[in-house]
Amino acid sequence: MAVRAGHAKRIAPQLTDDPMRAAEPKFTPVDTKSGSASLEIADALRRAITDGILTDGQPMRQSELARNFGVSTIPVREALKQLEAEGLIAFLPHRGAVVTGLSEADILEYSDIRASLESMAAGLAMTSLTRVDLARIEDAYEAFVSGTGGAQGMEQSGRLNWEFHGAIYAAAQRPRLYGMIHDLHSRLDRYIRAHLELPGRKAATDAEHFQILQACRARDGEELGRLTKQHILEAASLSLDVIRERTTP
Amino acid sequence: MAVRAGHAKRIAPQLTDDPMRAAEPKFTPVDTKSGSASLEIADALRRAITDGILTDGQPMRQSELARNFGVSTIPVREALKQLEAEGLIAFLPHRGAVVTGLSEADILEYSDIRASLESMAAGLAMTSLTRVDLARIEDAYEAFVSGTGGAQGMEQSGRLNWEFHGAIYAAAQRPRLYGMIHDLHSRLDRYIRAHLELPGRKAATDAEHFQILQACRARDGEELGRLTKQHILEAASLSLDVIRERTTP
DNA sequence: AGTTCTATAATCGTATACGATCCTAAGTAA
DNA sequence: TTACTTAGGATCGTATACGATTATAGAACT
């Protein structure tokens, strides 16, 4: 009866609120052999948040999550604590954990931080860029160009965009800096990809990425830093415009 | 018998390993009315780590901590999870949680990040510095000068140093940036204050702080950013020298 | 003596249970 | 009808208990 430790079943991110069959846990019985239950739950919830399935302010009750995942409340609490430390959710006592939406000011603030850290990482990468590093960047560039064109390219745009820029930053050989940039991306991704909805924005993004790629080929750290900073701030500004349009139509 | 929720007794950071009276929990029966047990334990352990009482690699067993704090293992686990997310400890399965020491490369990497973020915050602060902000900075400056001179000033140097620089960054009105800088300080503090042991270093630090204060008075963001960056990188470099001396005498 | 195997003990992760606190809605009075 | 009181239910945080896994020390063998 007791679920074996580390082998809890995992639920797909859709957390339907059907009051019927609430007693029957809804989960995909995929028994992944990796990690503990709390880690799996944290990953599932993190994906659900970054994919926009869990929207701001939606309360996530511990007992409800526990039922849906088919585990007790303790691994759920640990997963929520983890996400709280990552800044994705906040605990409201007796009101459930809620997804912490970022304000407009927060998005701008984080974008400034990103601009600073990512231009630094890009500049450092150019001082020690190997052929293999450049090849990885070229691969990621092409994957983004071809992978985000289709109808459902929006789903993958966040991942492919990160893989392109991340390939550059990885070449800097600065694991702590890389980790901090990655964290910022995971917090901002659901907001800063809104600008891709704008007409013609895909082509403009591809053009900017091509400029960045050219700077990498030339190993021009100065130019790459400038382009990176501009790329980030422009995407943030445009995405905020889109989000404003959404809320006040 | 059961400890009331949120009123668990708190232990002082000294976690003695006396095998005798192990059954008798050693704690200061201070019943603080604030926060839950896991938060208190997290704070206590965080202080113990940043104060250097818990050294690198020292295993912290969950059941042992639970006994010492007079609570069960669950709030201990949550506190450890919190500290893990903050990067202060790591979980080694079946070997206890250990304090994650930073390598020399890590310290240099984080110092570069600090230099970038803190010079940015300092520059921003100068664009909107009020009289009140400046007064707070002056106060913190004087507190550091007079507070770190005595024999046991080393204990407070970390806090007073942060209060001085933090007063500047707080004036930037960027809560997310401020939080990130604060996190970096809490991770690095136990390493980057080693340079204060050097003879004459206290006077040099005071002089650098005075230069920084003068730049604040002049509201010269450019100069302040340059001084801040230099201040951080110099302290890191000198501290690493001290740490190297310690390990290879 | 050194190496390999095994059995014990300890640790971890999680399930279940329960008291304390808080939100909520029904009921009463003005 | 509206505002206030109160009883009920729900949620949270933590204590206790237990199976699974692994480190470790002792025994057996070469």
Image (cartoon, coloured by chain):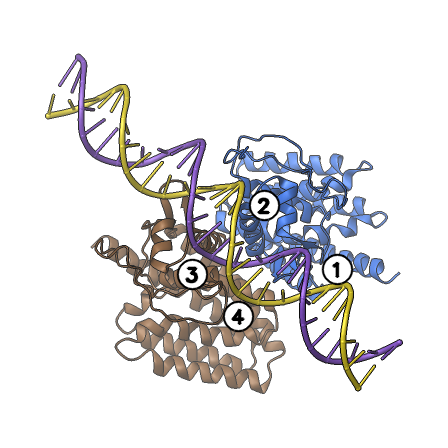
Chain colours: A brown, B blue, C purple, D yellow
Residue A225's disc is: 4
Instruction: Report the residue marked by disc 2.
Output: B42
Residue A34's disc is: none
Q: Residue at x 59, y 30 (%)?
A: B31
Q: CA–CA distance between discs 2 and 1?
A: 30 Å
Tell which tag, 4 or 3, sits nearer the viewer: 3
Instruction: Report the residue marked by disc 3.
Output: A41
Residue B237's disc is: 1
Q: Residue at x 65, y 64 (%)?
A: B109
* Above or below A60: residue A197: below
**For marks 4 and 3 on the same chain, the one whose residue lies earlier in the sequence:** 3
- Residue B162 visible: no
Chain under disc 1: B
Q: Would you call the spot at circle 2 few (<14 residues within 10 Å), some (14-19), or many (20 or more)?
A: many
The quadrant of the picture occupied by the N terminus of chain B is top right
Q: CA–CA distance between discs 2 and 3?
A: 22 Å
Amino acid found under the numbered disc labelled 2:
Ala
Q: Would you call the spot at circle 4 few (<14 residues within 10 Å), some (14-19), or many (20 or more)?
A: many
Say whether marks 2 and 1 touch (CB < 8 Å): no
Whether marks 3 and 1 lie on the same chain: no
